[in-house]
Structure formats: structure tokens, C-alpha cells
Image (tube, grey):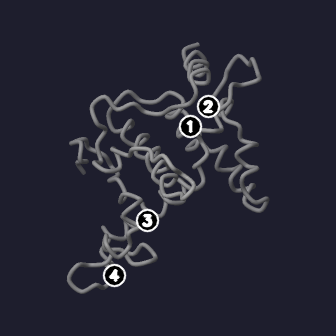
Amino acid sequence: GPTAAGLVSAFQLPPHPDELERSSEAGYDSDGTEMTEASGAPDRSPEAQARRAKAAFLRFFTSVFERLHDLYAVPASSAERLGPMDFFDDEAFLKGFPESARPWLRQLLHSQAFTEFLHARLQPPSGGPALLEVAYFNEAVDAKRNRSVRRFTKLPTPVLSTGAVPVGYRLRGPPHPVRTMYEHACAG
């Protein structure tokens, strides 16, 4: 359906993460279940269930990839063909999780879906639905970090607030040396 920016996407954006934090104010139960306005009973419509599933996946992946920005790396290898995983410190990523979770996470990191996820961040799209999806996820991570009591400076999250990429929006990407080397690897 149409998004707030008037773009057509197969997937609607999940609720703003802060809506789930303000459970009673935003019409959510303590477990994130959406409540109907009239009765206060859980909304069990397929649309509400889909929104809850999207919100749960968003919370999960923002937690898992919260440190993504800190894990970009300039490859040590001078291999002829470099791919997205060559620009990501997977061992440092895995060290941040319990040993029991690492086999599953290792499989996730070696999936095509993660390779595409990483590529979209290493070489960000310049516009359209792809930019909206990358910006939305990045800001969901920022919103999670903003909720930390140890964070004194809050990062703005205009995409989360509006569901659209503002004119002149600057997407935070990997460090310049990583992005430059990745763009060169993709061009060659």
C-alpha cells in the first residue's frame, strides 16, 4: 500500500518504537499487544497481528544490530573480489553475544539476506523505498539508543516520526574509508 511519502511498498512500516514504550498511552498492552479503543480488549484483526509481528521483528533486529555502525572494517585482504562481508567485523559482532547464540548468528551473517542488508548500508540508495527502509531501520536503532539513560545527546529521528525521508536528509553510513573502498570494489 501507499506509504506516508506516497511511495508504494509491499510492506508498511511498523509502529514507531517509542509507541511500544508508551504502552498504555499509545493503545498497547504491556506485551505490545494493540488494544481496541472501544472495549480495551486486544485487537486480534489480521492487520493488528501483522503490525505486532513487524514491530517484534523490528525490536529484535534493532537489538541484534544495534552496534552495526561500529563494526564496519577496511578489509585486510587485497583479494580481487571483495563482497559486503569483507567490510564487516563478524568476529567482533559475535563476541557481543553468548556462546550459545553464536551458531545461529553465524548462519544469519552468512545468509544472502544479511549480505543484501549490509550492501544497502555500505552503498546506501539515493532515494525511493530502499532509502526509506534503510533510514527507518537506522533511526529505529537511534531511537533504541535514545531511550538509554546513559545517552545524554539524543539523535533526531525524523523518518520514524513522519514515515517519510525529509528533503535534504543525510543518511548516516559507514566511515568514509570503508564506504570509499567498498564503492571502488563494487565498481571494479
The tag earlier along the polypeptide, 1 or 4, is 4
The tag earlier along the polypeptide, 2 or 1, is 2
User: What is the number of the mark on residue 53?
Assistant: 3
Q: CA distance from mark 4 to mark 2?
A: 42 Å
Q: Are marks 4 and 3 in contact (CB under 8 Å)?
A: no
| Spot occupied by residue 181 in the image (x, y as percentages of width and height) | 61, 18
Task: Kindly identify the residue that appears in the image at 56 percent across and 22 percent down.
Answer: 176
The tag earlier along the polypeptide, 2 or 3, is 3
- Dot 4 lies on which element? loop
Q: Are marks 2 and 1 in contact (CB under 8 Å)?
A: yes
Left-right relation of 20 to 108: left
Q: Are marks 3 and 1 in contact (CB under 8 Å)?
A: no
Left-right relation of 135 to 7: right
Left-right relation of 127 to 137: left
Q: CA distance from mark 2 to mark 1?
A: 6 Å
User: What is the number of the mark on residue 84?
Assistant: 2
The tag earlier along the polypeptide, 4 or 2, is 4
Left-right relation of 180 to 20: right
Q: CA distance from mark 4 to mark 3?
A: 14 Å
Residue type beneath disc 4: Pro
Residue type beneath disc 3: Ala
Q: Are marks 4 and 2 in contact (CB under 8 Å)?
A: no
| Spot occupied by residue 71 in the image (x, y as percentages of width and height) | 65, 38
- Dot 3 lies on which element? helix
Residue type beneath disc 2: Pro
- Which residue lies under the disc numbered 1? 118
| Spot occupied by residue 59 in the image (x, y as percentages of width and height) | 50, 60
- Which residue lies under the disc numbered 4? 42
125 and 31: which is toward the camera: 31
The tag earlier along the polypeptide, 3 or 1, is 3
